[in-house]
Image: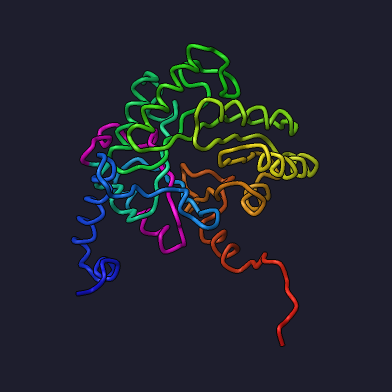
Amino acid sequence: MLHCKCRERFAPAEDIFTLHTEKRAHAAHGGTGMRPSFADFKRPPLVDMIIVETPTQFITNVHNAIYDGADAFGFQMERLKPEFRTEEMLTKMFSHLGDRPLYITNYRGAYNHEMTEEARLDELKLALRCGASLLDITGDTFDPTPGELTKNPTAIDKQKKFIEEVHEMGGQVLMSSHIYKFLPEEEVLAVALEQQSRGADVVKFVTWSDSEEELMQNLAAIRTLKRELKVPFLFLSGGRYCRLHRAIGPYLGVCCWLCVERYDTFSSREQPLLRAMHTVVENLDLTAPRPTDF
């Protein structure tokens, strides 16, 4: 009999669909199967960020991205039309990822303008039950604040409670703050440490790189973040020099590359194309040179 991995490899498409659906559902509901994790990679993963409105668009993006080298996926669920946000549909959609981990956002924009904070978080937990691995909540959840990092004690307590609930369900939480302005190193570190203190498994912050000087300061800050933080971090920026920050960051300590499979109506132009970043990662040798043995 073929080894399990071989049976997966050569199984008919419908069997693979069933297999991965069952594996994700089993792990999501407390079974012994392991949920795919972003911690499993030996190098920072190439994450394809998906922003689409329908399941068909999601599945098409997934399969194209797999051929382009995606190690993992991110899905901005706020853009998915509400009628598709059901357990049955999300489970089917996520099964197409195979054993690749999935990171989910459900921000206030797009189709979520009228939703309460509680409803948005309930949908995140639904996504977790359907097979997602990592849930993104902003640092101003329960208290919308410029810079997305509330100081309101009541809101912070609610955030901590949500994080505990996700951990009990077998998932992880990323806390994000979209600041969209340049911050000096000590302020970037302060944001990251505050997010970490609330129990986040991964911390994310987006600042600004609008000049060479800001870019270089952001790259230098990565060293400090790597030294001071106890959790993985995703440090990004916008601005004229942001693409270099996003491309180089993971070589210095940022936890992953956020990419897009293609540029379209909804995708972020700041994020590198997946196939381009994959080519760089697969061909750029950064190992230390050694004397030859011959």
Q: Quadrant of the C terminus?
A: bottom right
Q: Quadrant of the N terminus?
A: bottom left
Asked whether residue 71 is drawn in magenta, I would say: yes
Question: In front: 194, or 244?
Answer: 194
Q: Position of residue 172 (x, y in %)?
A: 42, 37
Q: Position of residue 213 (x, y in %)?
A: 80, 41
Residue at (52, 38) in percent of width and height: 202
Asked whether residue 58 is drawn in magenta, I would say: no
Residue at (45, 34) in percent of width and height: 173
Vertical placement of residue 251 versus 229, above or below: below
**Which quarter of the picture shows residue 109?**
top left
Q: Position of residue 108 (x, y in %)?
A: 44, 25
Q: Position of residue 92 (x, y in %)?
A: 24, 47
**Which quarter of the picture shows residue 278?**
bottom right
**Scheme of colours in the image:** rainbow
Q: Is residue 279 left or right of residue 294?
A: left
Question: In front: 230, or 91?
Answer: 230
Vertical placement of residue 68 versus 10, above or below: above
Range of residues picked out in magenta:
60-88
**Which quarter of the picture shows residue 123?**
top left
Residue at (64, 48) in percent of width and height: 253
Residue at (33, 37) in percent of width and height: 128
